[in-house]
Amino acid sequence: MGEDTRRYGELNPSPRLLFGTGPTNPDPRVLRALGLPLLGQFDPEFTAIMNEVSDLCRFVFRTDNRRAFPVSGTSRAGLEAALCSILEPGDRAVVGVAGRFGELLAEIATRCGAEVTRVETEWGRLIDPDALRAAASRARPKAVALVHGDTSTGVLQPLPDLVQIAHEVGAVVVVDAVLTLGGVPVETDRWGLDVCVAGTQKCLGCPSGMAPLTYTAEVERMILGRRRPVQSNYLDLGQLQAYWGPDRLNHHTLPTSLTYGLREALRLIHEEGLEARWARHRRAGAALHAGLEAMGLRLFGDPAHRLPMLAIVEVPEGISEAGIREALLREHDIEIMGAFGRLRGRAWRVGFLASNAELRHVLHFLAAFEDVLRDAGLRLPPRAGVEAAMRAVA
Ligand SMILES: *Cc1c(COP(=O)(O)O)cnc(C)c1O
């Protein structure tokens, strides 16, 4: 190997507007928190911060659960921690599969060695309560896993009826609220969610890398009463709760900077208030949906169950899905996303999450989107999107 004589430029990423389905742009105060001086993980100043993070998690999840803390790792680490700490090989689980993230829950539960029954529905539709009841009465599962807002389909799944069905057969309910927490109501205690898992880079407005979760005392007993230890040391909630709890039993080295960022993101939600934040996401989404429809574009999924902060936009005939995304990035510094599975190449996924859920961002996007679609040859009524968006929230 010769000496490396290249020069490496200063890191200077473009100021992208992240209008996809996550990550979203964090508030500048969150970014600033990431650069604060490090504390040791058992410094009393830092353990006090950990306790505040737990308190703020309880606030955002709307729960009085004793156990509420982030797992270090992205959202799927939180989902995996929940499922692999509850399920032992041979246990039965029922999973609602209505999109990419229901598939993920089924895959993780299968890897835990559980016997998994899938309750499937066509993408864009809700899980049918009767189908869940039939599967749950047959399987008598230990756990039922459900996605609250599936980012691949843009559908918001109402949970209370499904939770009741699971509880009737004695199962605990594990919910993926990765997209929804902080953007739409997630009522952990009122809806009876036994485990609720979130992510940081969606409606919480923090970089990815932690997965806040919470679970009940019943789930805690289930985890501590396992026949054999959790296969994963890193994702063992029994060990993690002993680290996050007053015993502070040493586990991994907590990512200090991300913990600061998460604390600041949660603090901002506390300061704004959950109701005001949900209303802000609703308002931005109403403008987005009205704007896109006024441009003559079709939105995927049942309008009655659309996630307010997302739009899954069908690609019109003759337009290149990837070409439009590239033009938005190149000409406007705007990122949106393509789709998965059977929607791949056929839809764009657009989202206004956390501090991006503002009318001015929606208007900026609609104007840029109109511009690149027109350049690609689509005939569009001028300014129809922007004007409809403004009217929708006037
Ligand atoms: C983004 C997302 C995930 C996965 O999150 P990572 O942070 O990428 O691990 C899981 N479920 C839903 C609903 C999501 O939107």
Image (spheres, helix red, strand yellow):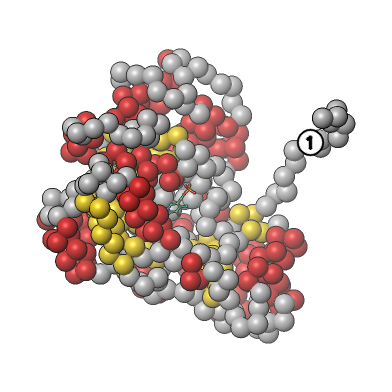
Q: Quadrant of residue 297?
A: bottom right
Residue 122 is drawn in which quadrant? bottom left
Could you tell me which residue is drawn at 22 percent across and 60 percent down?
162
Residue 12, compared with residue 158, is above or below; it is above
Q: Relative to the observer, which residue lies in front, 163 or 381?
A: 163
| Residue 121 in the image: above or below residue 146 | below
Q: Residue at x 65, y 68 (%)?
A: 322
Crowd band around label 1 with a 10 angstrom C-alpha radius: few (<14), some (14–19), many (20+): few
Q: What residue occupies the far top of the structure in this picture?
A: 43
Compared with 70, 159 (above or below) is below
Q: Quadrant of the N terminus?
A: top right
Q: Name the residue under label 1.
A: 10
The percent coordinates of residue 222 (x first, y second) are 19, 37
Q: Residue at x 42, y 41 (%)?
A: 77
- Relative height, residue 25 to residue 280 (above, below): above
At label 1, the amino acid type is Glu
Position of residue 76 measured from the top left corner of the image (x, y, whole percent): 43, 46
Q: Nearer the viewer, residue 241 or 276?
A: 241
